[in-house]
Image: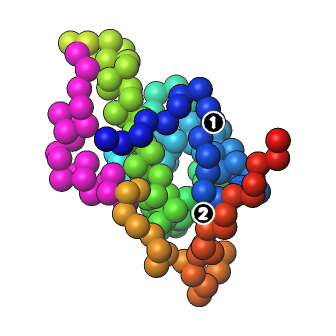
Amino acid sequence: MAVQPDPRKPIVFKVQFEHCPVQASLGVLGRKWAFLVLRDIAVFRAQRYNQMLRVTPGMTRRTLSMRLNELERAGFIVRAESDHKYTRWEATEKGRDVLPVLMTLVQFGAKWHATEVFADQRSRTLDEIFEPAFVRQTMDPLRAPRHSRKTPSDPGRPMAEATPLAPASA
C-alpha cells in the first residue's frame, strides 16, 4: 500500500529553487488578458489583430497591443507574417508549452464554473469538450520526459541536472 503524504506538512522538493518557478512563469503570463491572447492564437487560431478582438469581448485595442508586444518580447509568440496591411502571430515552442496549462484551466472552469460556462449548467470533462486526440496531443507534452530538451538561453547545452535540496535547518 502506498504511503499517503501528511497534508499538514509542506511538500519536500527534490531540488533547491533560487526563485519560485510559479512566480517566474507568471511574469508575463500573469498579466490580465495574456492567457486569453495565447488562447486566441494557439487554440482559436485567431492570429490576426481584429480576429483576436472579435473572439475576446471586453479586451481593448490598447490592451491587446500591449499584451502582443509583451508576449512577443518574452518569446511566447512571433510575428509570422507582417506587411503594411496586417500582421499574423503564431505561438513559439515556449507558447505551445503553455497549452497544457490552458487546458487545465479549461478543465477546472468546466468542472467548477459550469453554471457560467455552459447553457445547461452541467459540468463536463475535456473529452466532452474537445476531440480526445486533441486533448492527448495538447496535454501529453507536459507529461512527457524532457531530458533531451535544450535551455532557451543556450540551445547547444543540455538542461542542468537537478541538485539535491539543502538540509533543512531546525
Callout 2: SS: loop
Quarter of the view holding residue 8: top right
Give left or right: position of 154 versus 54.
right
* Residue under the image location 66 percent in, 63 percent down: 164
Label 1 sits on residue: 10
Say whether residue 35 is magenta: no
Residue 56, how many percent across, how many down?
Answer: 45, 33
Q: Would you call the spot at circle 1 few (<14 residues within 10 Å), some (14-19), or many (20 or more)? A: few
Question: Which quarter of the rendered picture does the N terminus lie within?
Answer: top left
User: Is residue 54 positioned above or below 76 on the image?
Assistant: above
Which three-letter amino acid code belongs to the residue tagged 1? Pro
First to last magenta residue range: 122-141
The numbered mark at residue 124 is none
**Mark 2, residue position:** 75
Q: Residue at x 53, y 31 (%)?
A: 6
Pointer 1 or 2: first along the chain = 1
The residue that appears at 47% across and 74% down in the rendered structure is 147
Of circles 1 and 2, which is in front? 1
| Percent of width and height locating residue 41 | 42, 51
Q: Considering depth in this image, is 116 or 162 the residue closer to the camera?
A: 162
**Image position of 96 (left or right of 153):** left
Can see residue 135?
yes
Q: Nearer the viewer, residue 68 or 167?
A: 167
Q: Amino acid at mark 2?
A: Gly
Tag count? 2
- Magenta stretch, main secondary structure, is helix
